[in-house]
Image (cartoon, rainbow, N blue to C red):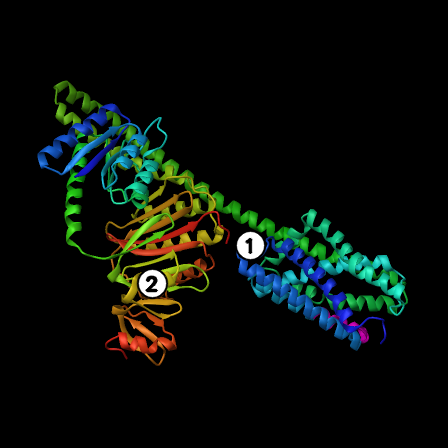
Amino acid sequence: MNIGMSFWEIVGVNMWSMCITTLLLLWCSRMLLGRIPGTGNRGRMAGGILLGLAMSFIWAFLGAVCYLKGVWRWPLGTGLILWEYFQMFIWMLFLKFLYRLSWRRCWASTLLAVFLTSLGNTMSNFLVINRVFDLRVTEELRHYLFWLMVLMPLCIFLFLVPVWRTGLGKLYGKWVIWDGAQGWLYFFLSLYPIFFRLLCWMVQKSQTDPNDNPMVSLLLLLLIHLALISRGREEEQRKQIAQQEISLRQQTVYIEQMEQMQTEIRRFRHDFKNLMAGMYFQAQEGELETLKSFIQDMTADFDRQAGDRIRIMNQLANVQVAEIKGLLLQHMTDMQKDGIRFELEVMRPFSDVAMRRTDLTRCLGILLDNAAEAVQGKKDGMVFVMISSQKDCVTIRVKNTLYEIVDFGRLGSLGYSTKGHGHGIGLSNYRKILEKYDAILSATSVEAGFFVQELKILQGCGT
Amino acid sequence: MLPVYICEDDKSIRQMERDYLEKQILIEGYDMEIVRCTSHPEEILEALSGNPGRGIYFLDVELKGESMDGFLLGQEIRKRDARGFLIYVTAFRDLAFETFHYHLEALDYICKQDTEAMLAGISRCLQIITERMRGEKDTGREYFTVKVLDVIRHIPLEDILYFSTAGRTHRIELHARQDRLDFIGSIQELEQELGERFLRIHRAYLVQVCHIDQVDLGRREVVLKNGERCAFSRNKRGELLARVPFGQ
């Protein structure tokens, strides 16, 4: 057909709008996933830009081919629907490359991003209602291109701004990262391009005013919005409740510890009176040496009885990450019950590090479990934890008394454990978590009869 | 002769430490001398820069009213004297000694609440130091020294099986007999630094030749003495077979 533009001119125009679409989609994904991909990783960022350009070019080129071959005019808009799915598929691959998330999340955020931009796109149709461009006329072509290259992106942009400002995007994002989302919702969203065309077609077929198209999409928006919002809220609440439960449990343990401490002190106070009476007697008799050793014994006794607990509680107060504090408290109580000596050193306040809290909690949990298990039921077993925050890095060390020879050759391989079959899954999980972080250095060693596991987390460096 | 430094903010304790140390050095004939006894950490650092070398330091942890505490002073001393002996004297029974030991390689800590125990602790430390210095002369062990962020580790070179690197990061894994640790570095530089004893059998592996037990030509892997396996590159095959005496 003759439209007064050469093939490459069409590709050029397409390239422009595809680049803009890519940018807008990127913005949507940033909104949904809450972060800019590849920060701190220049290679991936450069790769992303190149890939984005290549992707835009492929879209532009294929779009022009399809346009000229008349694919857009296939009955029932099948060409357009297929094209839309094709774009979505490519976009998902692109997101996968950028964010390295699971396929499910990439697809979910693709769906939402495409959905949001296509709504913005529909808005721009308002501006050209009842307008049929005759592209063979230069004037008309110019108007069309102005609409396509300037007005449409602007409309999408203006549509996305409130979504962004009101935090709606974030709420939608909750759904994207929600693993419990039900299949039917995906299915429904995945069918969006088909629904959209189908409804448009139905509206037009029923001889209604074609002006209703935006209404149809608004209705859809409302529906999906409601579904997503309720899901997002639910998810938010579920998380909050879980968090509250953890902190409640921690507080209970904490109060229990305090009460035990109080009982001990009360008991000690009782003994103290008797001891004082004895001391008074010794002083009267002039037995200075006996008195001295008596006082020393008493101090040591107090240290042993109540001092240990107070000391650990003081250290624990320096841990400012609630999850970690809870984890340590939990293990401390468990080990005390099992008669395992547990020591903790947190010399300086320990707050957030360049590692996701969930990952850190899991890693430390694995190390503590292993340490506790290794000394379980053994004589004089002890577990020692040190968390040391220094200027550039945080060091976490967990060490336990060693009773067996460790086979370093097989350490961390699946299923290896000094405790025999069925154990050792922890350490391989631990390795797997750490592989994600470039700024974390781990170490395992045997030192003076202790097995030591160590994590060093470099500060001031994103992951 | 080993210089001895004392930094303690309590005057009477400082005097007591000094007198006792002087007495011990005289009685036991230790080759040591007290060169500075003060409450100001800066003075210790100043004296140290005028007299660099290995020393013995008795440091208080809490230094009230001074510009730095015992931990920071220890860090400053370590920058100037990596092999010195740090002993902490504290009123705190619950000193975070593990942390001090880890970051500063502190030798011991002594509790000053009980005078007799404190003095006994001091003489025990002097004994340990003398023994350690004697022991050091005998062992001609070579060490691989590596900085892991804020600490320095020494691994006996003979115990190292291999180094490996994971992809594009600069993180290198050291695999030794009883150690496995990550550090930041470059495997090329390691290869040059370590020389003949180690062979770069693969882009990702630098192996100590004497720890290779077998060469599995079929699977293109070397089997180390502890059973671990590392892949080798095809073009390294010849060199590998020439270097490993009982290959196959």
Callout 2 crowding tier (Cα within 10 Å): few <14, some 14–19, many ≥20: few
Question: Could you tell me which secondary element the residue under label 1 belongs to?
Answer: loop
Q: Quadrant of residue A99?
A: bottom right
The circle on residue B192 is 2
Query: Where does residue A80 sit, x and y in percent of width and height?
Result: 76, 71
Q: Residue furthest top?
A: A284
Q: CA distance from mark 2 to mark 1?
A: 33 Å
Relative to the observer, which residue lies in front, B181 or A240? B181
User: What secondary structure characterizes most of the magenta part?
Assistant: helix
Q: Residue at x 26, y 55 (%)?
A: A402
Q: Quadrant of residue A77?
A: bottom right
Q: Quadrant of the N terminus of chain B?
A: top left
Relative to the observer, which residue lies in front, B206 or B100? B206
Is residue B141 placed above or below A300 in the rendered structure? below
Observer-side mark, 2 or 1, equals 2
In the rendered structure, the residue with mark 1 lies on which chain?
A
Q: Which residues are magenta?
A: A72-85
Q: Quadrant of the C terminus of chain B?
A: bottom left
Q: Are marks 2 and 1 in contact (CB under 8 Å)?
A: no
- The answer to whether any part of residue A9 appears in the image is yes
Relative to the observer, which residue lies in front, A47 or A185? A47
The circle on residue A39 is 1
